[in-house]
């Protein structure tokens, strides 16, 4: 039988997932972050450049979200604009060539 470590919210004593960074019941954010690889725990700032103990590069806390580029709803990525400008220029060039011929 494997003995799984258990974690409890220090605010309401609800059992929480070991990787959770907030309590699902009371919403309290936990001050410390736990490395999923080696189990080392420290505050968020210690994990900005990965785990200080083992060098695990993906911070397990909310800092991980900064790695992901989020596109806000209703805003298209820049390449869509670039592509439409290029398509517009190509259309004009094609039109000019047709007129010249
Ligand atoms: Zn709680
Ligand atoms: Zn680690």
Image (cartoon, helix red, strand yellow):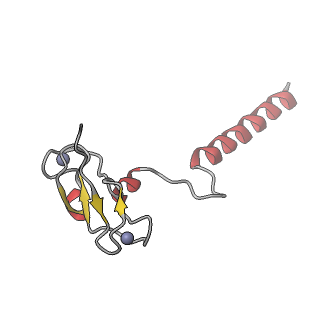
Q: Residue sitting at 43 percent across and 50 percent down?
A: 68
Q: Is residue 67 above or below residue 97?
A: below
- Residue nearer the viewer, 60 or 23: 23
Left or right: 97, with 40 as reference point: right
Left or right: 97, with 9 as reference point: right
Image-quadrant location for residue 1: top left
**Position of residue 58 measured from the top left corner of the image (x, y, whole percent):** 30, 46
**Position of residue 32 measured from the top left corner of the image (x, y, whole percent):** 24, 64
Quarter placement of the C terminus = top right
Q: Residue sitting at 64 percent across and 45 percent down?
A: 80
The answer to whether residue 79 of the structure is visible from this angle is yes
The answer to whether residue 21 of the structure is visible from this angle is no
Q: Is residue 29 above or below residue 51?
A: below
- Residue nearer the viewer, 43 or 101: 43
Left or right: 6, with 93 as reference point: left
Image-quadrant location for residue 21: bottom left
């Amino acid at each position: 039988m494997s003995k799984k470590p258990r974690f409890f919210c220090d605010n309401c004593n609800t059992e929480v997932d070991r990787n959770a960074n907030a309590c699902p019941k009371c919403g309290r954010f936990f001050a410390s972050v736990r490395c999923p690889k080696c189990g080392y725990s420290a505050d968020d700032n210690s994990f900005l450049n990965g785990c200080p103990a083992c060098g695990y590069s993906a911070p397990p806390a909310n800092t991980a979200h900064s790695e992901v580029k989020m596109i806000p709803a209703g805003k298209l990525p820049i390449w869509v604009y670039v592509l439409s400008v290029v398509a517009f220029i190509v259309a004009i060039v094609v039109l000019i060539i047709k007129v010249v011929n």
